[in-house]
Image (cartoon, helix red, strand yellow):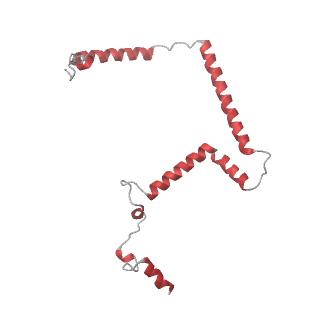
Amino acid sequence: MVDKTGKTAPTPTGADAGDGLGPADLVAAELALDDLFASARTAAPAALPEVLEQAILSEAAATQAAILERQALGSDLTAQPGAAGSGVFAGLRDLLVGLGGWPALGGLVTASAAGLWIGLAPPAFLPDPVSLAGLEQADDSLPYDSYDLAVVLSEEME
């Protein structure tokens, strides 16, 4: 293939070159691959060096200790023993701790906002919630369907 500048594109190699494998070659390759997987399943796993195992375990212990320390620090910040044990802020603090902290509260707010959005403006593929409730709005369901709301309200005021 020649482009506008007169340069030729490189010729395709591999599977695009047209010299692909025939059906018999594909079957032979699949059988060879099955044999490799079977031998890998039956082979015993290589032993993990003792130094590497100890390094993994010590790093895991350090990570667990850091997580526990952060959790303890977070519960200390929410408890604040010097603060008064009653009042609005103490109740909100207890609610926050009961919900799981700020990350859980953020997820709760996000889910609530998404539910409100879907409820107010449902996608086209969702059914109408009014029809699911069994309510039906017909023309005769409104008592004064020929009047404006202002006229109806003004008649009630008289």
Does residue 83 appear to the left or right of 149 in the view shown?
A: right
Q: Looking at the image, how many numbered discs can be counted on the residues?
A: 0
Whether residue 113 sits left or right of residue 94 in the image: it is left
Q: Residue 44 at what x, y percent from top left? A: 49, 13
In front of the other: 138 or 31: 138
Residue 56 in the image, given as x and y percentages of width and height: 61, 20
**Most extreme residue toward the bottom, as rendered?**
158
Residue at 34% over, 16% down = 33
Q: Residue 100 vs residue 127: left or right?
A: right
Residue at the (24%, 20%) spot, across then down: 16
Of the pair 40 and 114, the residue shown nearer to us: 114
Q: Is residue 57 above or below residue 150?
A: above
Q: Foreground residue, 149 or 44?
A: 149
- Residue 152 location, x and y as percent? 44, 81
Vertical order, 5 against 106 (above or below): above
Q: Quadrant of residue 36?
A: top left
The residue that appears at 43% across and 64% down in the rendered structure is 133
- The quarter in which the N terminus is drawn is top left
Name the residue: 38% across, 55% down: 126
Find residue 37 and report its horizontal and vertical position in percent. 39, 17
Residue most toward the right?
A: 82
Left or right of 140 in this view: 50: right
